[in-house]
Image (cartoon, rainbow, N blue to C red):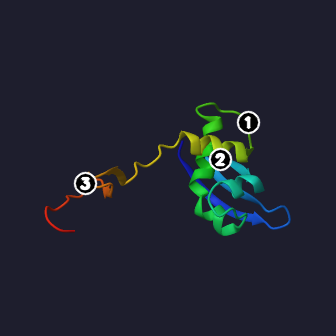
Amino acid sequence: MRYTVVAAWLDRKEKSGRIVLQAAGRSRTIVVTRRALLNVDTPPRATEERLLQHLDSFCEMALAFIGDRQDDCETLLVTATDVRNRRKAEPVPESLWTWQDQWGSWKQKGSRSRLGLV
């Protein structure tokens, strides 16, 4: 679902995020809980910078709840559980250090070892 972010800010008292966006011709508010902000990245921080850094992810998580339905949801909530579930679903990048040579040294995937002295 396409969307446009209208405004985003951190409620300093509650340390939770607020995002106002336009999606499917309607204005919606997303509330990002403090725990969601703490779980989205390391080190854990509930700051406005963290909210803005992961703005698209929070919007996508909230809008995934609606999907193609035209619910009357005006306020959507993103929790720490939503963040953890998304992180579990994301593919883990393949490590560059994947194998050992015959002498037990770790080699970078795609690198060529040279014959001779190292």
Residue behind mark 1: 72
Residue at image position (59%, 63%) is 53
Q: Would you identify the image quadrant in which residue 112 lies?
A: bottom left
Looking at the picture, how far across and down is residue 49, in whole percent?
65, 69
Check disc 1: other Cα within 10 Å, few if <14, some if 14-19, many if 20+.
Answer: few
Given the image, on which type of amino acid does mark 2 rest?
A: Val
Looking at the picture, how far across and down is residue 21, in whole percent?
64, 53
Residue behind mark 3: 110
Given the image, on which type of amino acid does mark 1 rest?
A: Asp
| Left or right, residue 104 beside residue 3 | left
Q: Nearer the viewer, residue 103 or 28?
A: 103
Looking at the picture, how far across and down is residue 70, in whole percent?
65, 33
Question: Eyeballing the image, is 45 above or below 60?
Answer: below
Label disc, if present, on residue 83 of the rendered structure: 2
Residue at image position (25%, 54%) is 110
Check disc 2: other Cα within 10 Å, few if <14, some if 14-19, many if 20+.
Answer: many
Front: mark 2 or 3: 3
Front: mark 1 or 3: 3
Given the image, on which type of amino acid does mark 3 rest?
A: Gly
Label disc, if present, on residue 4 of the rendered structure: none
Secondary structure beneath dot 3 equals loop
Question: Eyeballing the image, is 111 above or below 73?
Answer: below
Question: Eyeballing the image, is 81 above or below 101?
Answer: above
Secondary structure beneath dot 1 equals loop
